[in-house]
Amino acid sequence: MLTPLAPSANRASRKSLCGKPYVQVLVAIILGVAVGHFYPQIGEHLKPLGDGFIKLVKMIIAPVIFLTVATGIAGMSDLQKVGRVAGKAMVYFVTFSTLALLVGLIVGNVIQPGAGLNIDLTSLNVQAVNGYAAKAHEQSVAGFLMNMIPTTIVGAFVEGDILQVLFFSVLFGIALAMVGESGKSVLSFLQDLTAPVFKLVSILMKAAPFGAFGAMAFTIGKYGIGSVANLAMLVGTFYLTAFLFVFGVLGAVCRYNGFPIFSLIRYIKEELLLVLGTSSSEAALPSLMEKMEKAGAKRSVVGLVIPTGYSFNLDGTNIYMTLAALFIAQATNMDLSVSDQVLLLLVAMLSSKGAAGVTGAGFITLAATLSVVPSVPVAGMALILGVDRFMSECRALTNLIGNAVASLVVARWEGELDQAQLQAAFCGHQPAATSTDQPLTAPAPCKAAASLPVESPGWSQTPDNRAAGSKQPRA
């Protein structure tokens, strides 16, 4: 006969659950929706809470990237690995960005969310999209590449430009590795500095519920849940497409590389809820980098892949671009031929890189794409402007999951993923800190670990390294 838990045990259990960050953020999101819906004017005035939290996180992004990348590269014994990791990351980014565009195109043609709306272009208010279209014309691939080079070192950190900070960090890490013994004291100092910086990240994350509450209350208060109803087919199709991409395409990649997508999503649930509440994937960048390192991916890989992926691996944005373009064409009765859709795909592949890091990048990249594809009117973007905010959450969530998967997969390809540490992370056994690249001792097995294969594709374990969880390539 089972003995019921004592009241004190129940209280302790509830207190423990309420203390979990993801529970606090989830409750904050629900409260934000309620306040925004029932008290919209109050909700609109809560915008500073969300904006303030995002600014706090952006404040720490540059130091996190610099320390992670510089110490990771400087600690490499073979500098050729830097180019190899970057090359593999770019192959991954191009492949899966193209797949995301294709998935959006295919689902848009099958479901046809804009069919039957019969929208007259002359009835649309195009003034609202003129600003986005103007910004789109300012963007170019050449300009984007030149913008990666900071005018000054200090300027990169002052502006908080992710790619500029990453560019300098890579060069500094390579230089630090090349000077040898004379650079060891600098490397040691940077490694010691990593601990308080990541401690600051954890302190800032305690404000996440307030940021999520304010951002969600503002979104619902300003735009209203009812604004989704008019274009529910588009919003629903976009969420369905993102779901299919994450659990179909990315899920298959995860399974092939030896870990289930569900375990990864459960592992980064705090970051996902934070992104859901703030509609900003940048809000979760520092903690995502820390978590991927704790999950067994080497610091040098995480530091290169994730910041770069925030500009080059935008799966959610890519799905949105092709799906939204098809929706506008269908809603305005514009018939797109196969050649038009191929042109749309090719242009979207380029424009998605040209506007990276720009505020409102999803809408701007769409404007840049449509301005080159004459078959789809740019003015039709006024149709989706009202619900774009509700799709931005899904874009950011998909982008975040895509970059988490990319960091583990590239680390796995490079032989820099500790499988035992990955299992430990998925089981909730976290190391106190991750200031080095040393592997963990394999913990006691759990259900999450049991779902991971002992031998992942293309790798085998030898008797000498099985206990340490390291991998050696098959002969």
Image (cartoon, helix red, strand yellow):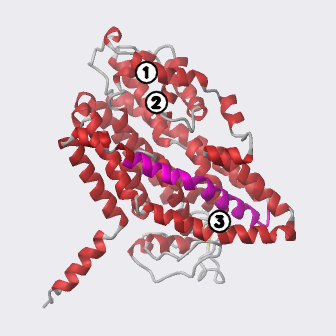
Q: Main secondary structure of the magenta part?
A: helix
Q: On the rendered image, what quadrant is the C terminus found in?
A: bottom right
Q: Earlier in the sequence, mark 3 or mark 2?
A: 2
Q: Find out whether the residues at labels 2 and 1 contact each other: C-beta distance under 8 Å.
A: yes
SS type, badge 3: loop
Within 10 Å of the Cα at label 3, are there few (<14), some (14-19), or many (20+) other Cα atoms?
many
> Can you tell which mark lies on residue 416?
3
Q: Position of residue 358 (x, y in %)?
A: 55, 35
**Marks 2/1: CA distance?**
9 Å
Q: Is residue 365 above or below residue 123?
A: below
Q: Nearer the viewer, residue 243 or 268?
A: 268
Q: Position of residue 83 (x, y in %)?
A: 75, 52
On the question of residue 76 being in view, the answer is yes
60 in the magenta segment: yes
66 in the magenta segment: yes
Point out the stretch of residues depicted in magenta: 49-78
SS type, badge 1: helix
**Marks 3/2: CA distance?**
36 Å
Q: Amino acid at mark 1?
A: Val
- Depth check, mark 1 against mark 3: the one in front is 1
Residue under the point 28% across and 69% down: 18
> Can you tell which mark lies on residue 129?
1
Q: Is residue 11 above or below residue 91?
A: below
**Marks 1/3: CA distance?**
45 Å
Q: Is residue 363 left or right of residue 297?
A: left
Q: Is residue 91 left or right of residue 336?
A: right
**Residue behind mark 2:** 363
On the question of residue 456 being in view, the answer is no
- Depth check, mark 3 against mark 2: the one in front is 2
Q: Amino acid at mark 3?
A: Glu
